[in-house]
Image: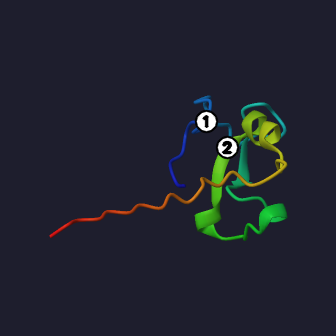
Amino acid sequence: MAGLTHCPHCHVELDYSQGRQPNSAEPDHVLPHRWGGKNTLDNGRVLCRRCNQSRGAGDRPRVRPHRVSHVDFAW
């Protein structure tokens, strides 16, 4: 995450020096604790406070349905 200067969602410039401002940089879990998310680097990212607060824990995890692909060939 080194060098991240803008929020990946709204593209506002992140402020790492002052907290509790709409553009303050905050750590975020991609998959929230509530839904089994771990405290690992691959489950973390940096968002601005406004985007992080608007996400919340959500009602359910946003998981794409598994698509089954079948390819049948008549050789």
- Relative placement, left or right, of 34 versus 71 is right
Tag 2–tag 1 contact (CB < 8 Å): yes
| Marks 2, 1: nearer the viewer | 1
- Provide the residue designation for mark 1: 9
Few, some or many C-alpha atoms within 10 Å of disc 1 (few <14, some 14-19, many ≥20)? few
* Residue farthest left in this picture: 75
For residue 24, say whether it is visible: no
Give the quarter of the image for residue 61.
bottom right
Which amino acid type is marked by label 1? Answer: His
Query: Residue at (65%, 59%) from the top-left corner?
Result: 44
Q: Which residue is at the front of the view, 35 or 43? A: 35
* Residue 16 image offset from top left, x and y in percent: 68, 43
Q: Amino acid at mark 2?
A: Leu
Q: Position of residue 26 (x, y in %)?
A: 73, 47
- Can you tell which mark lies on residue 72? none
Residue identifier under label 2: 47
Q: Tell me which label, 2 or 1, sits earlier in the chain.
A: 1
Residue 26 showing in the rendered view: yes
Determine whether the residue tagged by mark 2 lies in a helix, strand or loop.
strand
Mark 2 Cα shell of 10 Å, populated few (<14), some (14-19), many (≥20): many
Q: Residue at x 50, y 57 (%)?
A: 67
